[in-house]
Image (tube, rainbow, N blue to C red):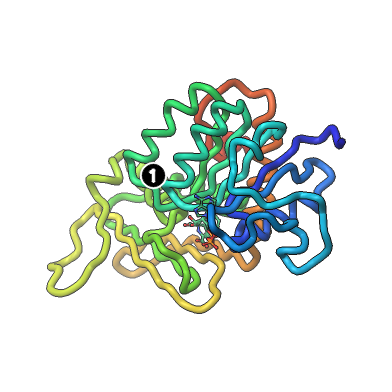
Amino acid sequence: MSDTPGIVITGASGRMGQMLIGQVSASDRVHLAGAVERAGHAWVGQDIGVAMGGTAVGVIVTDNAAEAMQDAQAVIDFTAPEATLAFAKIAADAGVVHVIGTTGMTDAQIGALDGPAKQTVIVRAGNMSLGVNLLTQLTKRVAAALDEDFDIEVIEAHHNQKVDAPSGTALMLGEAAAEGRGVALADVSDRGRDGITGARKRGDIGFTAIRGGDIVGEHDVMFAAAGERIILRHIASDRAVFARGAIKAAVWGQGKPAGAYDMLDVLGLND
Ligand SMILES: NC(=O)C1=CN([C@@H]2O[C@H](COP(=O)(O)OP(=O)(O)OC[C@H]3O[C@@H](n4cnc5c(N)ncnc54)[C@H](O)[C@@H]3O)[C@@H](O)[C@H]2O)C=CC1
Ligand SMILES: O=C(O)C1=N[C@H](C(=O)O)C[C@H](O)C1
């Protein structure tokens, strides 16, 4: 058995699940220790390599997450909010690092991770790419440098199967902009304009979500004033950027004290 950290992938058949299986299997820093899908899924009981259309790799897809995590060092979880909460308890009991990419969690659901984070390392981020995490820091700086003459708008675009809006990344960027301005995002957030909305409120941070085709993930932060605009942009054209970040987080978390971390901690970008 390899002496690199063993990684369990939840939501193994999903867009990110399959990308992660491929990236973990190809990595020399980690090895694939398990693959989890929801009960009743057609892949449960099959070798993950075969289920993905290739050759057997010796890892059978299971719906028993506790069993899968028993001999692993980390679980990488890009699934859905309720599933992620359940996996957090299981990962905490097993003492494995829990890397959470799942978005669309409510504040209450995020708060419910506090308990598991007392027992194990949780790294959670709405976007695991280096580029977006750097962009959050740039957004904070630009927002701090400009006053409310500049209207801040966050515009995101994703594929037509995405179920949550605004995206987790858009919310990270909105939080960064609000932090730069020294305000709470909850007090200035303007989401879902429709109908006679009235003029834009000074100081608001607006969000717009585009859904279409196979767009992987695109985010603009616009600072618009009379006579000029600044636009900070990130385009993800390959889900591998998210998978690479998640694997980095799983390795980084080994031996760290229990607690809640994000990708800025992993990438050393916290200021
Ligand atoms: N933080 C980041 O960098 C990124 C986050 N995401 C987020 O990751 C999540 C998943 O995205 P996709 O892969 O595109 O979705 P998807 O719908 O393709 O995959 C989700 C998978 O989770 C599985 N699942 C759901 N409940 C489960 C349970 N109880 N047990 C085991 N498996 C379960 C589903 O069967 C499915 O295979 C979304 O919340 C998305 O926004 C996606 C890309 C990057
Ligand atoms: O659902 C996706 O696909 C993505 N989700 C994340 C988000 O909500 O920001 C990250 C990335 O943009 C892709």
Q: Which corner quadrant of the image does residue 236 belong to?
A: bottom right
How many marks overall?
Answer: 1
Q: How far from the left and from the top, in percent, is residue 232? A: 49, 60
Q: Report the amino acid beneath label 1.
A: Ala
Residue at screen point 79% across, 43% down: 31
In the depicted structure, whether residue 23 falls above or below residue 52 = above
Residue neighbourhood size for the residue with mark 1, other residues' Cα within 10 Å, grouped as few (<14), some (14–19), many (≥20): some
Q: Is residue 26 left or right of residue 154?
A: right
Q: Nearer the viewer, residue 151 or 239?
A: 239
Q: How far from the left and from the top, in percent, is residue 160? A: 46, 74
Q: Which corner quadrant of the image does residue 13 belong to?
A: bottom right
Residue at screen point 63% across, 56% down: 44
Q: Does the beta carbon of the residue at mark 1 sit less than 8 Å from ligand 2?
A: no
Q: Residue furthest right?
A: 1
Q: Is residue 78 left or right of residue 245?
A: left
Task: Check the picture and name the quadrant holding the N terminus.
Answer: top right
Q: Is residue 208 left or right of residue 188?
A: right
Q: Nearer the viewer, residue 51 or 224?
A: 51
In the depicted structure, whether residue 152 falls above or below residue 268 = below
In the depicted structure, whether residue 91 falls above or below residue 166 = above
SS for callout 1: helix
Residue at screen point 64% across, 46% down: 246
- Residue 135 seen anywhere in this rendered image of the structure: no
Q: Find disc 1 in the rendering and name its residue.
A: 144
- Residue 49 seen anywhere in this rendered image of the structure: yes
Q: Which corner quadrant of the image does residue 176 belong to?
A: top left
Residue at screen point 20% across, 63% down: 200
Q: How far from the left and from the top, in percent, is residue 123? A: 55, 37
Q: How far from the left and from the top, in percent, is residue 17? A: 63, 56
